Amino acid sequence: MWEARAAAGRAEDLLAWAREQELTPAPLRRETFRAPQDRVLVITWWDADLAADLPDLPDPDGELAARPVHRWRFESVDCT
């Protein structure tokens, strides 16, 4: 999971930038979200261990983000 908060007035620019970023190899699935306070969230799904070396979106260039990017890895848990 990759999450960033846009700098003032740059929400649409950050969203466009995140959507343009390619990951090689590509994940099994990728979704991009926007949230209040000009946040952009990208969630990717992989068929790999949590410790695997996988590509991730970089930090945005220039003045697009209001603070450092947050990144987390999660694993799916069977809920029955």
Image: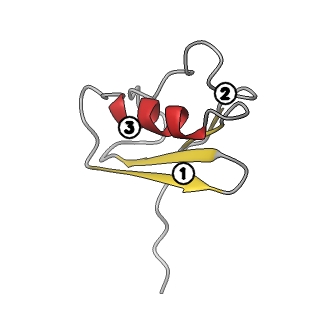
Q: Quadrant for residue 60, please give it.
A: top right
- Residue nearer the viewer, 5 or 44: 5
Relative to 24, say whether 31 is above or below.
below
Camera-nearest label, 1 or 3: 3
Camera-nearest label, 2 or 1: 2
Please indicate whether residue 80 sits to the left or right of residue 31 in the image.
right
* Outermost residue toward the bottom in this view: 80
Q: Quadrant for residue 40, please give it.
A: top right
Q: How many labels does the image show?
A: 3
Residue at mark 3 to residue at mark 2: CA–CA distance:
15 Å
What secondary structure is found at the residue carrying circle 2?
loop
Q: Position of residue 8 (x, y in %)?
A: 73, 33
The residue depicted at 50 percent of the width and 21 percent of the height is 58
For residue 65, the mark is 2
Q: Where is residue 80 in the image (x, y as percent from the top left)?
A: 47, 87
Q: Name the residue under label 1.
A: 74
* Outermost residue toward the front in this view: 9
Q: Name the residue under label 3.
A: 19
The residue depicted at 31 percent of the width and 29 percent of the height is 23
Q: Where is residue 52 in the image (x, y as percent from the top left)?
A: 41, 32
Q: Quadrant for residue 78, please give it.
A: bottom left
Relative to 4, say whether 34 is above or below.
below
The residue depicted at 73 percent of the width and 50 percent of the height is 37
Q: Are marks 1 and 3 in contact (CB under 8 Å)?
A: no
- Residue nearer the viewer, 12 or 40: 12
Q: State which tag comes first along the sequence, 2 or 1.
A: 2
Sort mark 2 into few (<14), some (14-19) or many (20+) by Cα contacts within 10 Å: many
Label 2 amino acid?
Answer: Ala
Residue at mark 1 to residue at mark 3: CA–CA distance:
21 Å
Q: State which tag comes first along the sequence, 3 or 2.
A: 3
Q: State which tag comes first along the sequence, 1 or 3.
A: 3
Label 3 amino acid?
Answer: Arg
